Amino acid sequence: MNAARLDFLKELANIGTGHATTALSQMLQGKLFQLVVPDAQMLPFEELADFIGGLEQVVAGIFVIISGDVAGHMAFFITSG
């Protein structure tokens, strides 16, 4: 994937995160939230452990399989530190 496509996906994620943050704020009667834009990387699955800090690093993650007109997969990980 080239840099322009990755930038497009990052911007798409930023827009979606902004909408989700606004909706959550409205559901919680106007509580304010700070939006922090995460880093996005495209890397082979084999490099994931090193990227997040090694095999012993504790993480929470979501793996999504995308099907239909656009097929693929996406993973989202949050580290403890």
Image (tube, grey):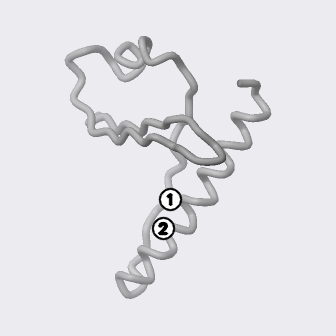
Of 75 and 18, nearer the camera is 75
Q: Which mark is residue 21?
A: 2
Residue 14 rendering spot, x and y as whole percentages: 61, 53
Q: Amino acid at mark 1?
A: Leu
- Classify 33 as above or below 14: below
Residue 80 rendering spot, x and y as whole percentages: 26, 36
Going by the picture, which residue comes out furthest to the bottom?
29
Contact between marks 1 and 2 (CB within 8 A): the answer is: yes
Q: Amino acid at mark 2?
A: Thr
Quadrant containing the C terminus is top left
Assess disc 2: are there few (<14), some (14-19) or many (≥20) residues with their C-alpha within 10 Å of its C-alpha. Answer: some
- Classify 10 as above or below 52: below
- Gap between marks 1 and 2 measured at Cα: 7 Å
Quadrant containing the N terminus is top right
| Helix, strand or loop at mark 1 | loop
| Helix, strand or loop at mark 2 | helix
The residue pinned by badge 1 equals 35
> Which comes before the other along the chain, label 1 or label 2?
2
Residue plotted at (50% across, 59% down) = 35
Observer-side mark, 1 or 2, equals: 2
